[in-house]
Amino acid sequence: SKWETIKEYKEILFERMDKIAKITINRPEKRNAFTPVTVQEMIEAFNYCRDDASIGAIILTGQGDLAFCSGGDQSVRGNGGYVGPDHIARLNVLDLQHLIRIIPKPVIAMVRGWSVGGGNILQLVCDLTIAADNAKFMQTGPKVGSFDAGYGSAYLARVIGHKRAKEVWFLCKDYSAEEAFQMGWINKVVPLADVEKVTIEWCNEILKKSPTAIRFIKAAMNADTDGIAGLQQMAGDSTMLFYTTDEGKEGRDAFLEKRDPDFDKFPKFP
Ligand code: 2NE
């Protein structure tokens, strides 16, 4: 494999191949269930990808062919959340969901085998999902005394429709990759042996496009679904662009030079 390790972690693999980063949940003996440590490591890796200008696309996946992720590790579920070495009960996967939403680079879920519970919500919040033909999608919360009424419900309803989203949560059935594709839950189904090859092809197609255009498309869709929080993100992107303009710099420079700004010279586009 041409993947090179970026950093060693306990519960994830973090690798890159040229401009593509790959974050792999590495607990195959538990069907890649996540603990607070797994999640914290993923948050750190995603933040690294956010800051590293040479990374343009991020793949999120699970180790092995049997599972993408089976959700929160029920064996470390304590009173009020999942408990790690610091003994604090956390639902830090919600922070990770938000990070995947706001990171201004495309995140592609590559799903082999089970995508379940909070793991299936991670798949949902990724920008695109490519699934192997052995993938299965399922919410189990109402069976195991849990639920995700945030992105896992309201955003799921946006993606697959309200009737379907209620069915997913009320019945807790599993759906094949083909069924998930028909529901608009995922983007593509490919043979298991080809899933990484196709995912890399999709990343490379995206990497040929304008990163700023991709960034604004993602932010605009967040703005539509996330209300003021989504608008804040898109507004931040606009501020970033404005800071690169002479008009933006004139305001800063005038302040620092203790003079009135001269904005007359800047164009007022229709
Ligand atoms: C994933 C699934 C359907 C796989 O079934 P199968 O038959 O392929 O494997 P098996 O034998 O069930 O699992 C293999 C090993 O992995 C452990 C199992 O206990 C088993 O261990 P051993 O018996 O070999 O020792 N394992 C699998 N998933 C685990 C998990 N989530 N936590 C701890 N150990 C796990 C089947 O395993 C399954 O249904 N798993 C449970 C899925 C689930 O209910 N996840 C939690 C949903 S709630 C959630 O994720 C959540 C939320 O709702 C809100 C906020 C945050 C999180």
Image (cartoon, grey):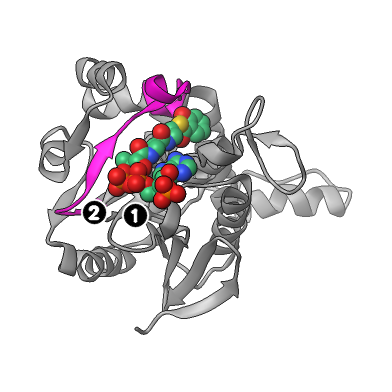
- Name the element at disc 2: strand
Are the residues tagged 2 and 1 within 8 Å (C-beta)?
A: yes
Q: Is residue 129 left or right of residue 19?
A: left
What x and y, as percent, mark residue 190?
13, 58
Whether residue 230 is visible to the viewer of this picture, yes or no, is: no
Q: Position of residue 228 (x, y in %)?
A: 53, 24
Q: Quadrant of residue 105?
A: bottom left
- Image: 193 above or below 38: below
Tag 1 or tag 2, which sits nearer the N-term? 1
| Residue 92 colored in magenta in the image | no
Kind of residue at disc 2 = Ile
Q: Position of residue 138 (x, y in %)?
A: 29, 34
Image coordinates of residue 147 in percent, x first then y, are 45, 22
- Please give left or right for residue 246 compared with residue 129 in the image: right
Range shown magenta: 130-153
The residue at which mark 2 appears reads as 130
Rounded to the nearest angstrom, the CA distance separating label 2 from label 1 is 7 Å
Note whether 13 is above or below 223 in the view shown. Answer: below
Q: Quick one: 221 or 236, which is closer to the camera?
A: 221
Element on which disc 1 rests: strand
Where the N terminus falls, by quadrant?
Answer: bottom left
Q: Is residue 141 magenta?
A: yes
Mark 2 is surrounded, within 10 Å at the Cα level, by few (under 14), some (14 to 19) or many (20 or more) other residues, namely many
Residue in the foreground of this view, choosing between 127 and 6: 6
Q: Residue at x 21, y 15 (%)?
A: 163
Q: What residue does disc 1 label? A: 108
